Amino acid sequence: NNSKTKAFLFGYPHLLPLMTGEKLNDMLKATRGKCGLTTSTTTSTTTGPLLVGVDLNGVSADNHHPGLLGPALEQVDVLHLNEEEAEIILGISKKELLSATTKLQVVTQALHKEGCAVVLLSLGSKGSYISVTSDANRLGKCPSIIRDHWKPGSAVRVPAFAVDDN
């Protein structure tokens, strides 16, 4: 098999107010069309589908605006953000959530409901949490590197660990 997955990572859409919501969705769709699954008739090779990632590093109450991701989440295979950024973009008050586990589930399920396939939530010194949509159809649209290794509805919590300076 000559297929290979390509990846496109788009970061900091909150700092590009003209590249959010529907415009971000259109750009991600166009990128998928240009870089996604194609077959060359002259070489009989196939390039694999495009894995689309979005990184929201740095979203704050000051630079967030409604509709930041909106319909673009349907194009996002992997979304990376931290707890605070998730609370901001979802409009969740810290007081609304009773436990850390509940918070992780509420946040990730809300993002899956909007169309995101995999949510990678950084938890700082507490590690990270990875959640996969339970929608098998949505997961089926992801490149095989995701589909073949993650089951719909799966989640894993990964603890932080010390890194040796040497």
Image: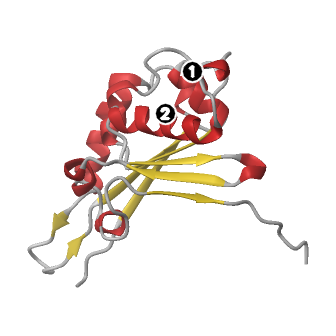
* Mark-to-mark CA distance, 1 and 2: 9 Å
Residue 109 in which image quadrant:
top left
Quarter of the image where the N terminus is located: bottom left
The residue that appears at 18% across and 63% down in the rendered structure is 38
The extreme front residue here reads: 98
Asked if marks 1 and 2 touch (Cβ < 8 Å), the reply is yes
> Residue visible at 31% across and 46% down?
31
Is residue 15 something one can see in this rendering? no
What residue is disc 2 on? 106
Q: Earlier in the sequence, mark 1 or mark 2?
A: 1
Q: Residue 138 got which mark?
A: none
For badge 2, the amino acid type reads Val
Q: Is residue 119 left or right of residue 161?
A: left
* Nearer to me, 56 or 88: 88
Locate residue 126, reporting x and y percent: 73, 51
Relative image position of residue 128 (x, y in whole percent): 63, 53
Element under disc 1: loop
Question: Does 136 sit left or right of 105 as displayed?
Answer: left
On the image, the x and y values in percent for residue 54 come to 48, 43
Badge 2: residue crowd in 10 Å (few <14, some 14–19, many ≥20): some
Disc marking residue 92: 1
Helix, strand or loop at label 2? It is helix
In screen coordinates, is 56 left or right of 43?
Answer: right
* Residue occupying the point 14% across, 71% down: 40
Quadrant of the rendered structure where residue 143 is?
bottom left
What kind of residue is marked 1? Ile
For the C terminus, the quadrant is bottom right
